[in-house]
Image (spheres, helix red, strand yellow):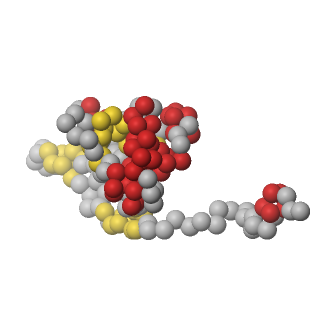
Amino acid sequence: MLTNEDNMKKYESYFTNPFKVNGLISRQYIPKVKEELVVDPNSGEMYTMRKVPKSAEQIHDPAVYTKVFQDQLEVLIGLSPASMKIVLYMICNMRPMIDSIVLSVPDLMVALDIKSAVTIKNSIMELLDTGIIAQELGSNIKYWINPNIFFNGNRVKLIQ
């Protein structure tokens, strides 16, 4: 009988990471340069001079991402599989700089391939109990996302 270790041997091993980053683009830009104050020796007038810079090129990653904060990992690890699916759904569907999300039971059932509305509702209650989300007043499908666990954008702008 094969052991897990024997099964693992059938997978290739790599010296360097075999996964290549996809979707990177190159952007042209003109770098800013400092101005110099120059005095004309003949007239004594002061001028500012700026060199005309050459354009530069920069690699840019336009992919959308959401930050997941490491110090909250314990909260996520303890979730049920269905609740974790909803968390992943929220991470993938968050809009930048928005700290709320719509969690519609029928939509979640389709998106996550979960057949039971009760399972979805129980999972949402688990997310409420763990403080990952909070229900928005006056709505039964809109929830506030705890930006200390994950967030799409700069959290500093939330408090300004």
Residue 97: tell me if it is visible. Answer: no
Tell me which residue sits at (40%, 60%) in the image.
Answer: 111
Q: Position of residue 127 (x, y in %)?
A: 42, 38
Q: Position of residue 90 (x, y in %)?
A: 39, 49
Q: Is residue 56 above or below residue 134?
A: below
Tell me which residue sits at (22%, 34%) in the image.
Answer: 137
Residue 64: tell me if it is visible. Answer: yes
Kindly indicate the quadrant of the structure image that contains residue 13. bottom right
Is residue 99 or residue 123 the one in the foreground? 123
Q: Is residue 65 above or below residue 145?
A: below
Tell me which residue sits at (52%, 65%) in the image.
Answer: 21
Q: Quadrant of the C terminus?
A: top left
Q: Quadrant of the N terminus?
A: bottom right
Q: Position of residue 115 (x, y in %)?
A: 44, 57
Tell me which residue sits at (48%, 68%) in the image.
Answer: 22
Q: Position of residue 105 (x, y in %)?
A: 34, 51
Q: Is residue 54 above or below residue 132?
A: below
Q: Horizontally, is 99 left or right of 26 in the view? A: left
Q: Is residue 69 above or below residue 12?
A: above
Q: Could you tell me how many numbered marks the image carries?
A: 0
Q: Horizontally, is 136 left or right of 2 in the view? A: left
Q: Horizontally, is 127 left or right of 70 in the view? A: left
Is residue 147 or residue 144 the one in the foreground? 144
